[in-house]
Every structure is written in structure tokens, then in C-alpha cells.
Image (cartoon, rainbow, N blue to C red):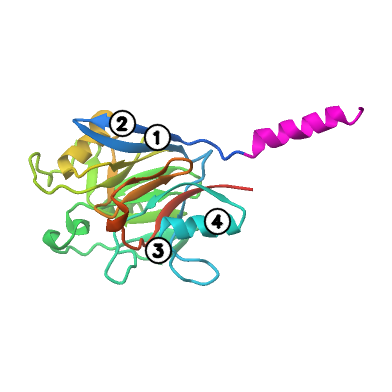
């Protein structure tokens, strides 16, 4: 009988550590549309970027492939979403930094906005710095800042700049898409959102400003965007619309 207390302690320890940590995930209604919103404290829930398998150099392409890769390493995928806009070769169209290494340089070329949202200026950069703080800057401001980063993705357009909607947005625009975006509420609080139905840029930007209380927010992508939360599955665009991703935000539960 003397081993029972030790057994009880072991069961208690395993019971406390085996489940994956819960994320702050919720469904919000805003102006008649529903959105899936995930709030991360990146000091507690380390956020990273993943494009290619480090061993094979093959692109992950999908959240499911990334989940299986993590599972094989004994890591459970808690959160994931596509990281930004990419080109026809399924490579990031703008800056992409992974584990401190610049894989794709900053892209400041001004294309035709009709050919893609990346050229709907100003576009911007989401970055996590070596000291662990996160920020969103316009691409021009990021270049001027000149600081090294640990993780970064360039996408566009900016949804909010210092609390103001992007001036390119039209209130009654008929361009309706499933949309995903990210904002940095504080230096460690990062908020991701994906629409559960098609919306225009103006409405999506106001979600971040008026509902989520953000000041700087960046658009990630449109009709292919999905958001994965462990235990809840996928939110966002229908599965048949999803194409291979180049860059995936992810939070893993470590062994």
C-alpha cells in the first residue's frame, strides 16, 4: 500500500501535462458576419513560420502536412494559418524570414493592383524580433527601421495603419472574399482572424479596428485562407478552394 501515494502523484502529474494547452479561440459576430478569432500570447505560445521541411527542403504546402510533420517529431499542432501572398511558383511574393534567416528579400516593387492584393499599397510586414516582441509595419517603414528579425512575412495590403483604415478601401465594394488577417495588439499579443463568409476589405478592416481594438493590421490572403485550431478543426474558406500555401504560421505544443 505504500506505493499508492507515489502512483497517485504520478497520475496527477500526467493528468496535468498530457493535454495540449488551450488557445484563446472564439467566434465573433460583426455586422452580420461571423469570424473565427485566435488571440496568442507569443511569450507563452511561441509563434513560428514554416515553409519547407528542413530535412527534405520540400514545401509543406498544407496545414495537414505540417501537422503530420510535427506529430512525427512528438509535437502537437495547436494553431496554424496561411502566412501571406505568394507567386505563381508557390514561393513567398515578399519578405520571408524563418528562424532568423532571410529566405526571400523585401519586395518594394509597385505592381498593378488589378493583378493582385500585394500591390494594393501600402503593403506591410509582420515581424517577430529576437527579443520576442512582435510588430506590424508598412513595408517602407520596415525597411527604414532596418532591424534584424527572427520571423517575418510580407503581405498586403495593410488593413490598418496607426488606427486608420487603408485609404484604398471602398465601403460598398462588391469585391467579396473569404479573408484572413493579423494584428499586434501589444508587443506580445497577436490576433488572427478569418471570415466565415465573403466580405470586402473595408468591412474586414473595421473588424480589426472597431471590434478587436487594433491599430495596425495586415491582410494575409483571400479565398484560400483557413485557420486551424486543435480540437476545433478548420475555419474560413471551403476546403475545395484551398491551394498550396507558401509559409504557414504555427504554434506547436512541445513534448
> Which mark, by number, is residue 132?
none
Residue at mark 1:
186
Query: For this view, does 3 lie left or right of residue 160?
Result: right
Give residue 203's position: percent from left, percent from top: 18, 38
Quarter assignment of residue 97: bottom left
> Which mark, by number, is residue 28?
2
**Does the image show residue 188?**
no
Marks 2 and 4, how far apart in space?
Answer: 29 Å
Residue 11 belongs to the span the image colors magenta = yes
Mark closest to the chain's N terminus, 3 or 2: 2
Residue drawn at x 38%, y 33% as measured from the top left: 26
Residue at mark 4:
70
Q: What element carries label 4?
A: helix
Give residue 178's position: percent from left, percent from top: 24, 47
Residue at mark 3:
61
Mark 4 surroundings within 10 Å by alpha-carbon count, few (fewer than 14), some (14 through 19), many (20 or more):
some
Q: Which of 180 and 96 is in front in this view?
A: 180
Residue 102 belongs to the span the image colors magenta = no
Q: Which of marks 3 and 1 is in front?
A: 3
Marks 1 and 2, how far apart in space?
Answer: 20 Å
Amino acid at each position: 500500500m505504500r506505493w499508492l501515494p507515489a502512483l497517485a502523484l504520478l497520475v496527477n502529474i500526467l493528468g496535468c501535462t498530457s493535454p495540449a494547452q488551450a488557445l484563446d479561440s472564439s467566434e465573433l459576430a460583426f455586422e452580420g458576419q461571423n469570424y473565427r478569432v485566435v488571440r496568442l500570447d507569443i511569450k507563452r505560445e511561441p509563434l513560428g513560420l514554416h515553409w519547407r521541411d528542413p530535412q527534405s527542403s520540400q514545401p509543406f504546402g498544407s496545414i495537414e502536412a505540417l501537422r503530420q510533420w510535427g506529430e512525427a517529431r512528438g509535437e502537437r499542432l495547436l494553431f496554424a494559418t496561411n502566412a501571406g501572398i505568394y507567386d505563381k511558383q508557390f514561393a513567398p511574393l515578399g519578405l520571408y524570414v524563418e528562424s532568423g534567416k532571410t529566405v526571400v528579400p523585401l519586395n518594394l516593387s509597385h505592381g498593378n493592383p488589378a493583378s493582385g492584393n500585394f500591390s494594393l499599397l501600402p503593403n506591410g510586414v509582420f515581424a517577430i524580433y529576437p527579443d520576442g516582441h512582435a510588430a506590424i509595419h508598412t513595408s517602407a517603414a520596415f525597411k527604414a527601421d532596418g532591424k534584424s528579425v527572427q520571423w517575418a512575412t510580407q503581405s498586403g495590403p495593410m488593413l490598418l495603419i496607426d488606427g486608420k483604415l487603408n485609404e484604398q478601401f471602398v465601403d460598398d465594394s462588391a469585391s467579396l472574399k473569404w479573408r484572413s488577417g493579423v494584428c499586434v495588439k501589444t508587443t506580445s499579443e497577436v490576433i488572427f482572424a478569418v471570415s466565415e463568409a465573403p466580405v470586402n476589405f473595408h468591412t474586414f478592416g473595421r473588424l480589426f479596428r472597431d471590434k478587436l481594438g487594433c491599430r495596425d493590421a495586415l491582410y494575409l490572403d483571400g479565398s484560400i485562407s483557413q485557420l486551424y485550431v486543435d480540437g476545433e478543426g478548420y475555419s474560413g474558406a471551403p476546403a475545395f478552394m484551398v491551394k498550396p500555401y507558401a509559409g504557414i504560421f504555427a504554434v506547436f505544443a512541445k513534448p
